[in-house]
Amino acid sequence: MSLDRFQSHDYLLLDDLLTDEQKLIRQTVRDWVKKEVSPIIENYAQRAEFPAHLIKGLAEIGAFGPYIPVEYGGMGFDQITYGLIMQEIERGDSGIRSTASVQSSLVMYPIYQYGSEEQKQKYLPRLAKGELMGCFGLTEPDSGSDPGSMVTNIKDKGDYYLLNGAKMWISNAPFADIAVVWAKDENGKIRGLIAERGMEGFTTPETHDKWSLRASATGELVFDNVRIPKENIFPNIEGLKGPLGCLNSARYGIAWGVIGAAMDCYDSALRYSKERHQFGKPLAGFQLQQKKLAEMLTEITKAQLLAWRVGVLRNEGRATPAQISMAKRNNVAMALEVAREARQVHGAMGITGEYPIMRHMMNLESVITYEGTHDIHLLITGMDVTGENAFK
């Protein structure tokens, strides 16, 4: 078990922009991560096993649907508070943050936004408590960045729908109790629905041999003539607007989350540079090491400002998908570069499990791809600023 010696870094005093409540919640989550996640996460990552016992704690700190209204079991927090929670959890591990992100933005969010009142009452309170865990089925074997080309489909059979198809790269799938699934109806319109574990023909084979997100459970969703009750169909959404709305929420959370991973790498590199001596002085005394550390901190600070501003806009209902894409793309790339530079500072020790660097770096190689790849987010912002659609 490793000791978590993390110290926060706030070079531009951005805490002045936060409320006392936001800082208190952040500290609560940080303390939980230090106590429950950091001491065990390396071992679980090495074994490629999801630490399922953390689910109860994630629920208790409000990590599941923190912005969902209290009447549906959520905490009623604002968007910046949600971001701070994701930041602190990902400081522990991207895979654990993925579990919380999926539950919040890809399962609870669509049920709250697009579901019936009966669906909200049935699922949201139990999801908030971690009594039910969910996953999100959009990506398919032949449909990733182009979700409109999905082949998973539903057919109206009178008093139920028949669901067929498959989804892959699904976080939480191996243990999820429910799945929010997107499928085309007989008119070619994309519809959202809730599939429940135990429905005949619904299986969730696990994905093995991952080099990234090893402490996260990933799998497939396979639907072979699964009967979906009509009351499990989302009544208030049709088309790609539904899943893309979920992805906007998830991408925003990622923009905050990866700052936590970057901060952890920077903090470890700074401490190591002061403790490790070569040529008669600490590494921190050499110009090239100072350059690395100064650039890391600069990029982290810029990412903090970007995430905070998008959070303000989301609180005001003014954040656009392109703005969220800019934040997700920039911040993940920043975190990955910080991890790589931090690995250099640590030298050979940076590849060992004694330090979190390589685990963060491998995790971020997935984060830079999921919820929209690095290039796709560039094109989203590019289309926004030029008015030209490069996707077609």
Image (cartoon, rainbow, N blue to C red):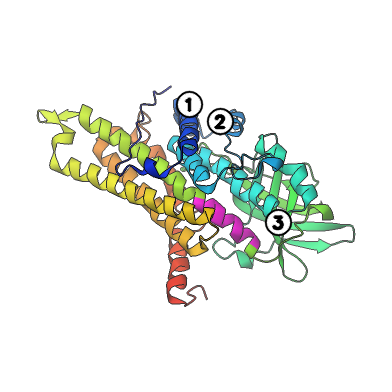
> Residue 51, which numbered label?
2
Percent across and percent down for residue 16 are 37, 42
Task: Tell me the kind of residue under disc 2.
Answer: Pro
Q: In this view, does 209 lie to the left or right of 152?
A: left
Q: Are marks 2 and 1 in contact (CB under 8 Å)?
A: yes
Please name the amino acid that badge 1 sits on: Ile
Name the secondary structure under disc 1.
helix
85 with respect to 137 (left or right): left
Residue sitting at x 66%, y 35%: 130
Question: Residue 35, percent across and down?
Answer: 47, 24
Label ID, residue 114: 3
Answer left or right for 63 relative to 227. left
Q: Tag 3: Cα neighbours inside 10 Å, few (<14), some, or many (≥20)?
A: some
Query: In the rendered image, which residue does mark 1 sit on?
Result: 40
Q: Position of residue 165 (x, y in %)?
A: 71, 57
The mark lying in front, picked from 1 and 3, is: 3
Question: Looking at the image, can residue 197 be seen?
Answer: no
Q: Position of residue 229 (x, y in %)?
A: 83, 52
Q: How far apart are marks 2 and 1 (CA)?
A: 9 Å
